[in-house]
């Protein structure tokens, strides 16, 4: 029994003084830990301030997407968590849009038409009265349309694809969704 207790204490001592990475991963030639697959960097949206985003969109000929939020808005936080963290949405937005975030309660200044105005004033220029609200713009900055309120990821992805290819100019959103759903489920029979 005494030997068992001594062995247990020695083992506990060895574990407590061993470097953290001894039991997790092997050091590589450069001395760094090997990358564990779960530690890969997650794709994230790159958000821009209003003035910077509009300039970037015009230069790159991409649609600006202006998302209005507040720090106290529960639906805004839910949209961040559910919609803006969706892998497919992140991919489409980073490739085809310039994502812009505007805090509708912020006094932070941005430059618009050569003047300094607050983000709160930008929200007022767009007529935003409830949050969240997302405006879609042409690359020139001309307004297309808003989508007010929380938007689920599947609906938001439809909107992104409808706007990015300028399909809003030739077909209604409802018609576009019907066409996309037919493509996704070509063998689905209509119920009588």
Image (cartoon, rainbow, N blue to C red):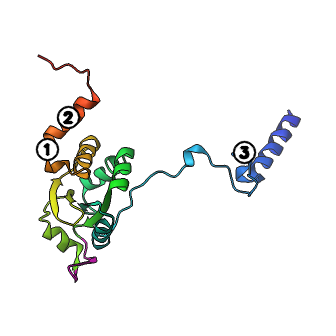
Label 2 element class? helix
Q: Is residue 18 left or right of residue 177?
A: right
Label 3 element class? loop
Q: Earlier in the sequence, mark 3 or mark 1?
A: 3
Residue occupying image coordinates x 74% and y 58%: 30
From this viewpoint, which residue is outermost toward the bottom? 115
Q: Is residue 42 left or right of residue 131?
A: right
Residue nearest the observer in this picture, 11 or 137: 137
Residue 171: assigned label: 1
From this viewpoint, which residue is outermost toward the top? 192
Q: Quadrant of the N terminus?
A: top right
Mark 2 — residue? 179
Query: Magenta residues, as a range?
Result: 106-116
Q: Earlier in the sequence, mark 3 or mark 2?
A: 3
For the residues labelled 1 and 2, say whether their Cβ atoms are less than 8 Å apart.
Answer: yes
Residue nearest the observer in this picture, 19 or 120: 120
The 10 Å Cα crowd at callout 3, few under 14, some 14 to 19, many 20 or more, is: few
Residue occupying image coordinates x 22% and y 83%: 114
Q: Report, in whole angstroms, how far the alpha carbon at label 3 lies from the one at label 2.
A: 54 Å
Residue occupying image coordinates x 39% and y 45%: 87
Query: Is 142 colored magenta in this rendering?
Result: no
The 10 Å Cα crowd at callout 2, few under 14, some 14 to 19, many 20 or more, is: few
For the residues labelled 3 and 2, say whether their Cβ atoms are less than 8 Å apart.
Answer: no
Q: Report, in whole angstroms, how far the alpha carbon at label 3 lies from the one at label 1.
A: 59 Å
Label 1 element class? loop
Mark 3 — residue? 23
Res 19 quadrant in image: bottom right
């Amino acid at each position: 029994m005494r030997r068992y207790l001594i062995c247990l204490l020695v083992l506990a001592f060895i574990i407590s003084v061993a470097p953290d990475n001894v039991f997790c991963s092997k050091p590589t030639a450069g001395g760094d830990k090997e990358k564990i697959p779960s530690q890969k960097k997650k794709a994230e949206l790159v958000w821009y301030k209003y003035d910077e985003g509009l300039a970037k969109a015009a230069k790159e000929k991409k649609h600006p997407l202006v998302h209005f939020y507040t720090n106290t808005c529960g639906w805004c936080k839910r949209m961040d968590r559910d919609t803006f963290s969706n892998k497919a949405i992140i991919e489409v937005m980073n490739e085809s849009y310039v994502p812009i975030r505007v805090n509708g309660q912020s006094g932070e200044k941005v430059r618009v038409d050569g003047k300094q105005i607050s983000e709160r004033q930008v929200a007022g220029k767009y007529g935003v009265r409830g949050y969240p609200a997302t405006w879609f713009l042409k690359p020139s900055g001309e307004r297309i349309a808003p989508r007010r309120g929380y938007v689920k990821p599947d609906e938001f992805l439809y909107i992104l694809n409808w706007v990015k290819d300028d399909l809003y100019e030739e077909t209604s959103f409802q018609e576009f969704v019907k066409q996309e759903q037919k493509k996704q489920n070509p063998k689905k029979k209509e119920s009588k």
